[in-house]
Image (cartoon, coloured by chain):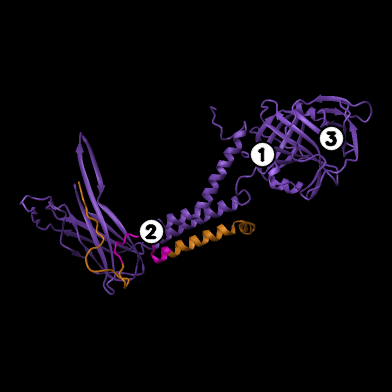
Chain colours: A purple, B orange
């Protein structure tokens, strides 16, 4: 709602410049900031007004929310009655703004604070909280972790206040977060604690509440102290559901492995060498021998009981040798063929007193969607043409084979979005704590 | 029950995940390898294998 500042019902005269400072709360307001001469003064019920401070730092830009303007937050109408510009005593570069909001219906006060474009709606509470030694406030719903501790310095104040805002400089303020919520403790001495509850507000909420264009609000940088991480509202459900689905994929894969992988063929073959014909060029010079094919070996028939994937496992007795085993799987009823090539090589030796080996004697090939039926295998072995020794190899066929890559693909697809969100949340959390002296991410030696 | 109701927040992801799981089960039961196939046989117009003999065999050059 875009409500222009209305005329205040009353005004007090600034004791320094005589400018009239309007105010809305005649009962409680006793401290005022003059926007003309930047003087902060007390106007007691009786007696003369007292100048308390003349501010030297004045904000270059007008406050985002005009004094006297109204807005709707959480269903209640609030009027902006005061504005403060504060910083930390120890680190003056940490500066934020606070707007004093007065609820029109009840006269209750709240604060709206903005730091680096991150908004917090702060409400005083009568509740007292116990802080554990680890800096954690435990409440039934959640735990609040200590995020920041500082003493404020008032750089500037204008409008009306029901307390001496300058007295806040003697406070030690501790902020405990459980995004999007925050608990704020103001401590004057160890026995006197005031607690506030704060809630993160999106800039859009503030803009809509006070009828302002979003561009008029401070530009947001970094991560706010109580800014919820991406997917905050549904992350518990998403992560649990994704893990359950991933578990279901793994269990299903294990079940398919137990149910399938049924051996339907297992046999050893021996490939005998064939005579190598020397090859010469036109001048009669010997040429480099090419890999020689050996005799085609045909397996006995075997039955594939159901349509599914087939695993053909090959093992060859190679030693400092290699063999390439192209094979075709032939359906004896339909003539349909499947083909693949298994390559095996194994080399071993001793070099400078150390034994070494490389390569492998076995391999396996997976053929997709092989229909049920009667099949046989044709092998076309190739090996070193100069190798005179027979090569022994074994072929094992398993029906209803399971493809581990299917399970891996399903896991990747199911976990991709939760994984990206997890990474974004982790980055968000680590960015949030960069502004804190109590970061759980800080290394012990830093 | 409340937890199941809270899944409404992630209904699109839940639907996507269930469909993915369904695809995985279907592929597993029908013996379909989703990521490639070791079969080197190129199907002909009849959908069956070609002539006899190995096809797509790699020439093996060795050291």
Q: At which x and y percent is residue A232?
A: 62, 48
Hey, which residue is sitting farthest left in the picture?
A284
The local secondary structure at tag 1 comes to strand
Q: Residue A102: x and y, percent? A: 82, 41
The local secondary structure at tag 3 comes to strand
Determine the residue positioned at 30% across, 56% down.
A364
Q: Which of the numbered marks, if any, corresponds to residue A177?
A: 1
Q: Are marks 2 and 1 in contact (CB under 8 Å)?
A: no
Q: Height in image: B50 above or below A349?
A: below
Quick check: A279 left or right of A237? Answer: left
Chain letter of disc 1 in the image: A
Have a look at marks 3 and 1 and say if they share a chain: yes
Compared with A9, A312 (above or below) is below
Whole-angstrom CA distance, mark 3 to mark 2, is: 73 Å
Give the mark count: 3
Segment tinted magenta in the rendering: B27-42
Kindly identify which residue carries mark 3.
A160
- The mark nearer the N terminus, 3 or 2, is 3
Q: Chain of mark 2?
A: A
Q: Is residue A234 magenta?
A: no
Q: Is residue A136 visible?
A: yes
Q: Which comes sooner in the sequence, label 3 or label 1?
A: 3
The residue tagged 2 is A403
């Amino acid at each position: 709602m875009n409500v222009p500042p209305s005329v205040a019902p009353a005004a007090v005269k600034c004791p320094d410049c005589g400018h009239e400072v309007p105010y809305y709360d005649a009962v409680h307001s006793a401290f005022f900031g003059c926007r003309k001469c930047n003087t902060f003064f007390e106007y007691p019920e009786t007696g003369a007004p007292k100048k308390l401070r003349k501010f030297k730092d004045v904000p270059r830009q007008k406050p985002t929310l005009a004094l006297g303007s109204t807005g709707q937050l959480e269903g209640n109408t609030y009027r902006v009655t005061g504005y403060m510009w504060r910083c930390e005593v120890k680190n003056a570069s940490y500066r934020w703004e606070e707007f004093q909001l007065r609820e029109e219906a009840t006269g209750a006060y709240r604060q709206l604070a903005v730091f680096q474009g991150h908004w917090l709606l702060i409400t005083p509470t009568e509740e007292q909280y116990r802080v554990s030694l680890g800096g954690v406030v435990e409440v039934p719903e959640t735990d609040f972790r200590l995020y920041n501790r500082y003493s404020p310095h008032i750089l500037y104040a204008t409008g009306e206040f029901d307390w001496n805002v300058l007295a806040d400089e003697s406070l030690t303020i501790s902020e405990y977060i459980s995004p999007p919520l925050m608990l704020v403790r103001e401590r004057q001495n160890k026995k006197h604690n005031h607690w506030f509850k704060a809630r993160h507000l999106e800039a859009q909420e503030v803009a809509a509440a006070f009828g302002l264009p979003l561009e008029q609000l401070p530009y947001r940088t970094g991560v706010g102290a109580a800014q919820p991480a991406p997917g905050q509202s549904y992350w518990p459900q998403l992560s649990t559901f994704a893990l359950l689905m991933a578990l279901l994929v793994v269990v299903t894969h294990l079940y398919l492995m137990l149910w399938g992988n049924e051996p339907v063929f297992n046999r050893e073959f021996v490939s005998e060498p064939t005579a190598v014909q020397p090859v010469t060029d036109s001048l009669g010079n010997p040429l480099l021998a090419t890999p020689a094919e050996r005799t085609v070996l045909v397996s006995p028939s075997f039955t594939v009981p159901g349509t599914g994937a087939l695993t053909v496992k090959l093992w060859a007795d190679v030693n400092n040798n290699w063999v390439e085993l192209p094979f075709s799987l032939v359906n004896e009823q339909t003539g349909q063929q499947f083909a693949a090539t298994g390559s095996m090589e194994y080399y071993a030796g001793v070099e400078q007193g150390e034994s070494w080996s490389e390569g492998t004697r076995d391999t396996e090939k997976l053929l997709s969607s092989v229909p049920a039926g009667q099949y046989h295998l044709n092998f076309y072995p190739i090996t070193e043409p100069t190798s005179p020794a027979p090569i022994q190899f074994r072929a094992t066929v398993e029906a209803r084979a399971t493809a581990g890559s299917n399970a891996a693909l399903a896991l990747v697809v199911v976990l991709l979005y939760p994984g990206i969100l997890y990474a974004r949340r982790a980055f968000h959390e680590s960015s949030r704590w960069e502004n804190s002296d109590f970061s759980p991410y800080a290394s012990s030696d830093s | 029950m409340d937890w199941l109701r809270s899944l409404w927040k992630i209904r699109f992801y839940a639907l996507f995940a269930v469909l993915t799981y369904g695809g995985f089960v279907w592929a597993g039961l029908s013996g379909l390898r989703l990521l490639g196939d070791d079969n080197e046989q190129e199907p002909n117009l009849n959908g069956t294998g070609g002539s006899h003999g190995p096809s797509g065999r790699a020439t093996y050059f060795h050291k």
